[in-house]
Amino acid sequence: MKIASIDVLPLTGATVDGGWPQGHEPQENLHTLIELHTDEGISGVGSCFTSGKLVQGAVDLLWPLLKGQSAVEPERVSENLRQSSFWQGRGGSVEHAISGIDIALWDIMGKACGQPVSRLLGGNYRNRIRPYGSMLFDEPDALRTSLEATVSRGFKSIKLGWRPFGRRDRKFDELLVRTARETVGADVELMVDAGGSEQFWPHGLNWARETARMLADYDIVWFEEPLPPDDIEGHIELTRQSPVPIAGGEVLTRRQSFQPWLERRAVDIIQPDVTKNGGLSESRRIAWLAFDHNVQMVSHGWNTAIGLAADLQLAAAMPVARYVEYLTPCAYLEELTVEPFVIDDDGCLEIPDRPGLGVELDRDRLKQFIR
């Protein structure tokens, strides 16, 4: 079975605010689907956390290396793309495009074998997992309303991130966290994402250490991206001192970039993004390296339905997986598949066990987001 053609499908019209200071428009294109077609009629879908124009440029670069390759050898094909585009890639948009291609290849192989991707990744340790609703901080009254809506949808874990947290003063940060805890109660887990990968992040180790102590008073599960993502030394020291587990790694690409963070215990929780860091092939390697270093792995997923489906398959195949990120509300996640994701009474998602990624795109709904 050979790769015959590829489609690049930029999503626009319902893009969720990512919290960046320059603002956002729903028409902004931050997510792109990739669909690979084979000479035997089987197709697979992947997702990239990158704009369509950048993905298309990367696909133009990679297509001569991809055309005619085996469609059922995802790790070899993806690694060949990575190695052969080394001087123009080595991360960034090229690696993001390889991520979507890799996910699509795993989808094809699962369909060709009649097996869910999780089984091909090594086997199923679980058939369901808890999603955490991922959303932005807001002013206290608006935050309270958003949290009530999220809890009413069945989420028992929620992550709050980015503005205005960390952008004013410590008293306001604590007001936000206190508001969140009082709104959801003691039985809903809360995580906090400072968003240290924002441009010109102003805070350093002292701010992060004191903030972590405040978060511990509110039983926060983890403190994410408290420092700029290049400050590995600061993360190492913070992880050593913090009473709250420290999480990060969403901006890293390729398994080699994750190695020093794991070997030096720079975080308690590593967060590879399957739609950016090389796909399922790289994420599987990263997850097992984290396991070997006794570091928790939780996939980062500011995502689409296809990205979440990939995260679910990976989580099924990892022995110590506990969560998947669930961007909410998000039309690209909740309106793209024939069968929607459903949170059960325990606050968990069932992991699809159908062949491939286990989800099917709703072609009619997809049309409204492809312009």
Image: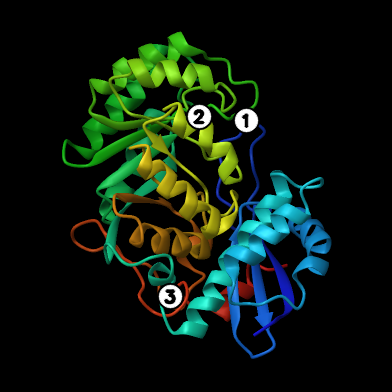
2 vs 3, front mark: 3
Toward which corner of the image does residue 181 lie, by quadrant? top left
Q: Are marks 3 and 1 in contact (CB under 8 Å)?
A: no
Q: Residues within 10 Å of mark 3 (few under 14, many from 20)?
A: many
Determine the residue positioned at 77% across, 74% down. 67
Of callouts 3 and 1, the N-terminal one: 1
Nearer the observer, 223 or 119: 119
Q: Is residue 321 left or right of residue 302?
A: left
Q: Residue at x 49, y 64 (%)?
A: 305
Three-letter code, disc 3: Gly
Q: Secondary structure at mark 2?
A: loop
First along the sequence among labels 1 and 2: 1
* Residue at the spot of label 1: 21
Residue hosting label 3: 358
Residues at circles 1 and 2 in contact by the CB criterion of under 8 Å: yes
Q: Which residue type carries mark 1?
A: Pro
- Colour scheme employed for the rendering of this structure: rainbow
User: How far apart are the two marked residues, 2 and 3, measured between alpha carbons?
Assistant: 35 Å
Contact, mark 2 vs mark 3 (Cβ under 8 Å): no
Instruction: Tell me how far mark 3 sits from mark 1, CA to CA.
Output: 37 Å
Q: Residue furthest top?
A: 206
Number of residues whose C-alpha sits closer than 10 Å to that of mark 1, classed few (under 14), some (14–19) or many (20 or more):
few
Q: Which SS class for mark 3?
A: loop
Q: Name the residue carrying label 2.
A: 163
Residue placed most toward the observer, 349 or 335? 349
* Disc marking residue 30: none
Q: Quadrant of the C terminus?
A: bottom right
Tell me which amino acid carries mark 2.
Answer: Arg
Q: Residue at x 28, y 45 (%)?
A: 157
Picture coordinates of residue 106, whole percent (x, y): 53, 70
x, y percent for residue 308: 46, 60
